[in-house]
Amino acid sequence: MFKRVLIANRGEIALRISRALRELGVEVCIIHGREDRLSLPVRLSDRAIPLYRSNPLDSYLDYEAVIQAAIDIGAEAIHPGYGFLAENSHFAKRCEEEGITFIGPSAEVISLLGDKIEARKAMESAGLPVARGSESAISDTETASKLAEKIGYPVIIKAAAGGGGIGMQIVNEESVFESALNLCQSRAKSAFGDSRVFVEKYIEGAQHVEFQVLADGTNAIHFGERFCSIQRRHQKLVEEGPWLTPEVREEIGNRVCEGAISVGYKGLATFEFLRDKHGDFYFLEVNPRVQVEHTVTEMITGHDLVKLGIRIAAGEKLPLTQSQIIFSGHAIQCRLNAEDPIKFVPSPGKLWDCHFPGGNGVRVDTHAHIGYEMPGCFDSLLAKLVVLGVDRNEAISKMKAALKETTLIGVETVIPLHQAIMDEPDFIARDITIQYLEKHHNLLG
Ligand code: MV4
């Protein structure tokens, strides 16, 4: 195991990683910006390295400074968490060059999976189901519109360098295809400096289901699925699991393991899928990092995913077999963002009071505390409230009780929205697609 690890992140995930490192007997180091100098993950670290920048985000994005900090303090590895540098192949490459372990997959694998055309091709070859679409980047409009005609409208045009839905265009008829293609290409060019796009059949009325994988470069196991359809502008709000029957879990689970093995994946990964109303799956992308909602999987399997990811990075082979992954109960997570619950605009401010629920099957991952100054310049995630019930109905009841007990004074939060969702008949009936919030306007005030 490592002796000393540097955390290149902030907020709740920095605290989550810090806990995992402590349990593994590793010294906890962390970089931080000015806004976070008094934060819990910084105060609880063994060593904190200030990297103050005029733009607060740069404290966590200046990767040469992060690498220099690791060298200066003698950290053998860097944990990137999620966001910031987590999916930056240049950063992972620079770590490799400096002999520092990047806790995650290789730079080469990050770069392969970051190209959605390459990722799609690799996963299709490994036997994962994909939507009908273009095998390579679209070069000319005519070929593209012929392909769209063949696949049948609606189609979706996506950026190769994308993910997170940036620039994506849904096209319902041929007459607007060319303008949508141009728009997607120019959005892709300005957002990613890469104008390559591809076309897929648009999957209507779909659910978002993702599989948790852990791989060691040679072998892979899966920890089942999470259901994450309740999202707004590609920001998830509610995540839960399990969602599928054991048979379907085993089938898709085996395939994602094959997919991870085929690219020599090392570390934690999430395989995202759409699932249509017939129950058919379509691979979307692989997220090569720990995710915000990993907690749902920890609740239903009992395994500590963050510790497992660190152990793999330290060179251990998979310490578990698939048969040791056993699912029990139903977990739901509500993201408690410091935002206006209707318009979702960030609500920074000082937490004058702060109380979180507890009790059987209730977990709160947060860096919040009384007196905490919630900055407006970072992600608005203040806490993750996760509950585990024997079944989904018990989990919903527990979540309602836990939301009621949560006290956060000084900022607005999305708690009222979560409370409305937990009482909403379609949510209770599991009748949820990725359009859930658009189709339930009544929940937004
Ligand atoms: C799709 C799709 C429908 N059909 N692909 C959105 C983000 C990116 N990861 C892929 N996305 C989608 N791809 C096909 N062929 C619909 C979406 C999508 C979506 C997917 C997951 C969760 C929320 C979403 C919200 C809007 C669109």
Image (cartoon, rainbow, N blue to C red):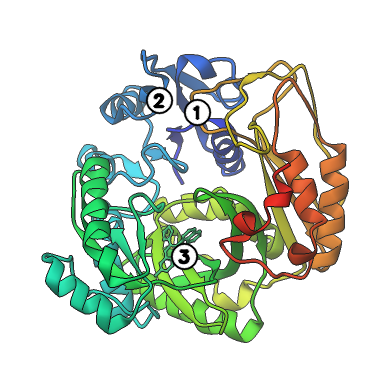
| Residue 1 in view of the camera | yes
Which residue corresponds to the image point at 61% horizontal and 86% vertical from the top-left? Answer: 247
| Residue 303 in view of the camera | no
Disc 1 residue crowd, few under 14, some 14–19, many 20+, Cα 10 Å: some
- Observer-nearest residue: 369 or 186? 186
In this image, 176 relative to 416: left or right? Answer: left
Q: Position of residue 427 (x, y in %)?
A: 74, 63
Spatial distance from mark 1 to mark 2, Cα to Cα?
A: 7 Å
Spatial distance from mark 3 to mark 2, Cα to Cα?
A: 27 Å
Spatial distance from mark 1 to mark 3, Cα to Cα?
A: 25 Å
Mark 3 C-beta closer than 8 Å to ligand 1: yes
In this image, 125 relative to 343: left or right? Answer: left
Q: Provide the residue designation for mark 3.
A: 272
Q: Provide the residue designation for mark 1.
A: 378
Q: Quadrant of residue 45?
A: top right
Q: Amino acid at mark 1?
A: Phe
Q: Position of residue 246 (x, y in %)?
A: 65, 82
- Observer-nearest residue: 208 or 70? 208
Q: Amino acid at mark 3?
A: Glu
Q: Position of residue 129 (x, y in %)?
A: 40, 80
In this image, 140 relative to 153: left or right? Answer: left
Q: Amino acid at mark 2?
A: Leu
- Sequence-wise, the earlier of marks 1 and 3 is 3
Secondary structure under the numbered disc 1 in the rendered image: loop
Q: Decide: marks 1, 3 in contact (CB < 8 A)?
A: no
Q: Provide the residue designation for mark 2.
A: 57
Q: Decide: marks 1, 2 in contact (CB < 8 A)?
A: yes
- Sequence-wise, the earlier of marks 3 and 2 is 2
**Can you tell me which quadrant of the image ligand 1 is in?**
bottom left
